[in-house]
Structure formats: structure tokens, C-alpha cells
Image (cartoon, grey):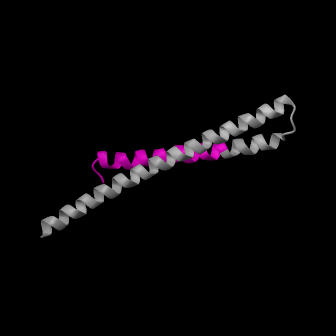
Amino acid sequence: MRGGVAAAKSVGKATARATRILILEITGFFFAVFAAMGLAAAWRQWQRIQSGQSAPVSHVIVTLAFVAAFIYFSVSSFWRARRHAAVKESGNG
């Protein structure tokens, strides 16, 4: 009976760890996609400014701030996923 409980705890712990790493990586991917979309929007705005259409430069600046924030979120999410994976490899998790 105790062996079954210990096995279930072990499997549950490993599954929870793998799920956490996967969620962090998926989150990082979506943040990267949003950053790429923001970068494309900033480029379109910049092209409008260059062609003489009425588009304020502040739109490009705000969009680039958005892009910078989402790049940071993406990198930090992947960094945390890597750190969680490294803990198990070192034998401490």
C-alpha cells in the first residue's frame, strides 16, 4: 500500500514539474508572438509616417515600448523554464 502511494506521489510530482515547465515555455512563446505582432504594427506606423500620412510618432514609440515589455516577458518566461529544468538535472528537485 505504501509503495503505491509513494509511486503516485512521485509520478504526480514529476508530472507537475513537467507541466510547469511546459506552461512557462508556452507562455514565453505567446509573449514572443505578441512582440512580433507589435513590431509589425510599429513598422506599419513608421511606413505611414515616412509616406506623409498623418500618423503621430508617439504611436510608434508606444508600440515599441509594448514590444520591449513583451520581449522581456518572453525571455524571462523561457529563462524560468530553463531554471526549473536545470534544478532537476542537478539532482536538487
| Residue 9 position within the rendered picture, expressed as x and y whole percent measured from the top left | 24, 63
Give the residue furthest to the top: 51
Residue 75 lies in the magenta stretch: yes
| Residue 71 position within the rendered picture, expressed as x and y whole percent measured from the top left | 59, 42
Q: Quadrant of the C terminus?
A: bottom left
Q: Quadrant of the N terminus?
A: bottom left
Left or right: 88 with respect to 60? left
Left or right: 87 with respect to 56? left
- Most foreground residue, 87 or 6: 6
Residue at point 44%, 52% (across, down):
23
Q: Quadrant for residue 17, please give it.
A: bottom left
Residue at point 57%, 42% (across, down):
33
Residue at point 61%, 42% (across, down):
35
Q: Which residues are magenta?
A: 67-93
Q: Is residue 14 above or below residue 56?
A: below
- Most foreground residue, 51 or 62: 51
Left or right: 88 with respect to 59? left
